[in-house]
Image (cartoon, grey):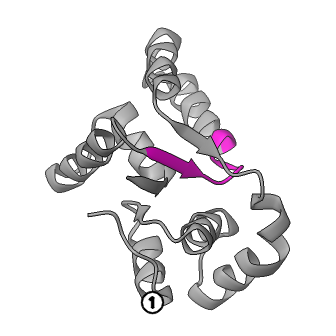
Amino acid sequence: MNLVLDNSIVMRWYFGDGKPGDLAYAGRVLEALETGRALVPATWCLEAANVIARAEARGLVTEARSTAFLGLLQDLDIEVDPDTVQHALSSTLQLARRYGLSAYDASYLELALRKAVPLATLDEGLQGAAKRAGAARFR
């Protein structure tokens, strides 16, 4: 199964914290990616790198832990969307305006709508926007 993978899921894998329901959902997404492919907007790599760098700087994780985690990500079939930037000032901006999202969050929604694949996210604002926009949510 193909899906759009929001960074909120990836960070549950990285930190291993959160509500039990959120961790279970993140686990189901990871299981789906054993045979499926994740699509991510072009900003995803920077978003993930920012969280990792900040966590290391705060002493929450070690660089060795981060390196091991990045190895896990490299083993997954994650495709960075090459067209994210082309949609940033048009459909992504419109989605951000319409649903009160950051442009970063709107880029996940835009990708899910454009590719007609489910969105995997734990972000409540993004979940609500996806529902109102008619995007499928990964279950």
Q: Quadrant of the C terminus?
A: bottom left
- Specify whether residue 39 is painted magenta: yes
Residue at 35% across, 42% down: 12
Q: Is residue 138 above or below residue 53?
A: below
In the image, 6 versus 113, the foreground residue is 113
Residue at 59% across, 51% down: 40
The residue type indicated by label 1 comes to: Arg
Q: Is residue 17 above or below residue 88?
A: above
* Stretch of the chain drawn in magenta: 37-46
Q: Which residue is mark 1?
A: 132
SS for callout 1: helix
Q: Residues within 10 Å of mark 1 (few under 14, many from 20)?
A: few
Residue 3: image quadrant is: bottom left
Q: Could you tell me residue 52's position as x and y percent?
A: 55, 31
Residue 57: image quadrant is: top right
Residue at 57% across, 86% down: 99
Q: Could you tell me residue 94's position as x and y percent?
A: 72, 85
